Image (cartoon, grey):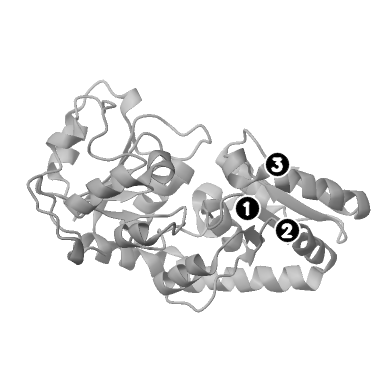
């Protein structure tokens, strides 16, 4: 199978992780085409901005069996060199990974389009907003190699030397409003006043490699709290390192992802605006609890999310995608 991943840039390095995982653990071909490099310095495959000759890109599009769009779709008007995606999707299997902010903020028009064409979406920033989204979405653990075993990152993870009593709480506010960074900052300011051993590390403008080194040196990683049900790659990266990860998860989302992963729990510390301070105080004052939570998270990652265990699910997902046809009549009862 020839798989083509397409995006303006590679959000959270999802595309390159997926490509590496598929090619390492299967016999399928996977390529990633982006308009431009991600500012956080993820690895990349093909960048339209760097090309003068589009023969390889045209060949890859022509030969693709599956086209996976990220934060875009086949009606995107931004040119990918000579490629206009609307001319190439007929007769192929297509899907959407991360429908993008326009879909989340104003989902109905896009949802109606995806329903019409029976296009599956994979919601990896992991929110179940309503029954319409459940109709459209196929929850899948997106293949992510353990950073601890990835040669690109492995040299970062050296033994940590720091005073035993020092506790580092880290936040990566890539989207301040959506992540509730202002609330986290306020809570941490109060905690530090009464817990002198606690250090708050808010990371902005770092490359992904540098950010992962900082995460490795942390004890607790706060992801998101402002929009209920959102959690992302920061959470999974933290869990993969055996760190305590915090995010706001409604029961509906927990149930959904338990089913997708085949597990009975999520190793994420569930916080909301009301209990964030209390939960953080409990974690920063109890080293045994932090150690146990981190150990449970790492074991969960190895069992349910690590690449060799998840790659088969996404290949099966690709295999079962319907063929895209512009003249297709809506058949809502056959949707996921």
Q: Pick whichever, 79 or 1, lies toward us.
A: 79
Which residue is disc 3 drawn over? 182
Residue ID at (63%, 44%): 172
Report x, y in % for residue 65. Answer: 16, 51
| Label 3 residue SS | helix
Q: Which mark is residue 225?
A: 1
Count of numbered marks: 3
Is residue 15 shown above or below 290?
above
Horizontal side of 45 relative to 42 (left or right) equals left
Residue 66, how many percent across, how many down?
A: 20, 51
Lateral position of residue 114 relative to residue 220, left or right: left
Checking the image for residue 276, the label placed there is 2
User: Do the residues under discs 2 and 1 have CB atoms within 8 angstroms?
Assistant: yes
Q: Is the residue 142 above or below the residue 172 in the image?
A: below
Contact (CB < 8 A) between labels 3 and 1? Answer: no
Residue 88 at what x, y percent from top left? 14, 38
Label 1 SS: loop
User: Considering depth in this image, is 325 or 244 the residue closer to the camera?
Assistant: 325
**Which is nearer the N-term, disc 2 or disc 3?**
3
């Amino acid at each position: 199978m020839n798989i083509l991943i397409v995006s303006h840039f590679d959000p959270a390095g999802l595309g390159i992780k997926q490509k590496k995982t598929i090619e390492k653990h299967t016999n399928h071909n996977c390529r990633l085409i982006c308009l431009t490099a991600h500012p956080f310095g993820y690895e990349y495959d093909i960048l339209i901005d760097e090309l003068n000759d589009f023969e390889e890109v045209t060949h890859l599009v022509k030969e693709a069996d599956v086209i996976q769009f990220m934060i875009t779709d086949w009606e995107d008007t931004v040119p990918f060199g000579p490629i206009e995606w609307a001319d190439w999707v007929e007769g192929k299997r297509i899907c959407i990974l991360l429908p993008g902010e326009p879909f989340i903020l104003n989902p109905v028009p896009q949802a109606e389009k995806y329903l019409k064409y029976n296009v599956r979406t994979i919601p990896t920033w992991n929110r179940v907003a309503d029954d319409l989204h459940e109709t459209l979405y196929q929850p899948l653990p997106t293949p992510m190699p353990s950073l601890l075993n990835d040669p690109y990152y492995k040299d970062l993870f050296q033994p940590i030397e720091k005073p035993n009593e020092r506790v580092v709480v880290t936040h990566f506010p890539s989207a301040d409003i959506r992540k509730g960074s202002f609330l986290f900052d306020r809570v941490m300011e109060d905690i530090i006043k009464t817990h002198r051993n606690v250090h708050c590390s808010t990371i902005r403008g770092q490359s992904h490699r540098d950010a992962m080194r900082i995460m490795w040196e942390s004890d607790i990683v706060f992801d998101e709290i402002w929009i209920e049900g959102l959690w992302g790659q920061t959470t999974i990266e933290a869990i993969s390192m055996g760190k305590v990860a915090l995010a706001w998860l409604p029961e509906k989302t927990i149930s959904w992802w338990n089913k997708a992963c085949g597990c009975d729990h999520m190793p994420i510390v569930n916080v909301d605006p009301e209990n964030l301070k209390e939960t953080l105080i409990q974690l920063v004052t109890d080293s045994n609890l932090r150690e146990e939570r981190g150990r449970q998270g790492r074991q969960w990652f190895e069992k349910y999310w690590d690449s060799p265990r998840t790659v088969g699910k996404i290949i099966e997902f690709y295999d079962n995608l319907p063929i895209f046809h512009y003249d297709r009549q809506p058949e809502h009862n056959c949707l996921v």
